[in-house]
Image (cartoon, helix red, strand yellow):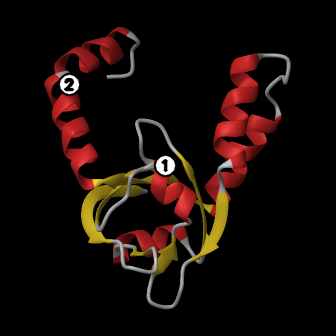
Amino acid sequence: MLIGEYLHTLDSKKRLSLPAKFRKEVGRKVVITRGLDACLFMFPLSAWKGIAEKLQKLPIGGADTRGMSRFLLAGAVETEVDGAGRILIPEYLKEFADLRSRVVLAGVSDRVEIWNEKTWEEYKRRIEKGADQMAQTLGDMGIL
């Protein structure tokens, strides 16, 4: 399971070093794509295959399903984790998430989210303020 929050640096060649704990979980190949809330999603290849299969089963008649499929699949790139534990982030994804030199990697169960440090801090503050209400909603659904 991918959990935890790590601050790393994106080098001048657009390479990002993965935390050692994540390297073991993700393996040698990962898929990076546009994520939600202005971050990138990075999936181990095996988890990505499950996501792609679910997206393939969505009906193409609905605008929302077509749009989400395009958003995730067309923006995705498969990349290898190099011997030093780094991944290369393409320019278009770097721009999408406004990645600068300081980047936050957040483990979220089956994926790693890659965030601009300032965007992450702002998002985290907003979520922390609403945690009680989110817990209530999840409790009403029988999840918590």
| Mark 2 crowdedness (10 Å alpha carbons): few <14, some 14-19, many ≥20 | few
Please tell me which residue is depicted at 35% across the width and 72% down the height of the picture. Answer: 10
**Quarter holding residue 123:** top left
Please tell me which residue is depicted at 53% across the width and 63% down the height of the picture. Answer: 91
Check disc 2 and give the amino acid type. Answer: Ala
CB contact under 8 Å: marks 2 and 1: no
Q: Residue furthest bottom?
A: 83
Please tell me which residue is depicted at 53% across the width and 56% down the height of the picture. Answer: 93
Between 25 and 76, the one lying in front of the other is 76
| Mark 1 crowdedness (10 Å alpha carbons): few <14, some 14-19, many ≥20 | some
Q: Residue furthest top?
A: 140
Between 111 and 126, the one lying in front of the other is 126
Name the side, left or right, on which 88 lies relative to 68: left
Name the side, left or right, on which 114 lies relative to 45: left
Instruction: Please report whichever mark, 2 or 1, sits nearer to the chain's N-terminal start.
Output: 1
Q: Secondary structure at mark 2?
A: helix
Please tell me which residue is depicted at 72% across the width and 35% down the height of the picture. Answer: 69
Between 132 and 84, the one lying in front of the other is 84
Q: Which residue is mark 1?
A: 96
Decide: is 20 above or below 84.
Answer: above
Q: Nearer the viewer, mark 2 or mark 1?
A: 1
Check disc 1 and give the amino acid type. Answer: Phe
Q: Count every numbered label the image shows and give the total.
A: 2
Which x, y percent locates residue 45?
A: 65, 62
Q: Which residue is mark 2?
A: 131
Q: Secondary structure at mark 1?
A: helix
**Quadrant in which the C terminus is drawn:** top left
Which x, y percent locates residue 107?
A: 37, 54
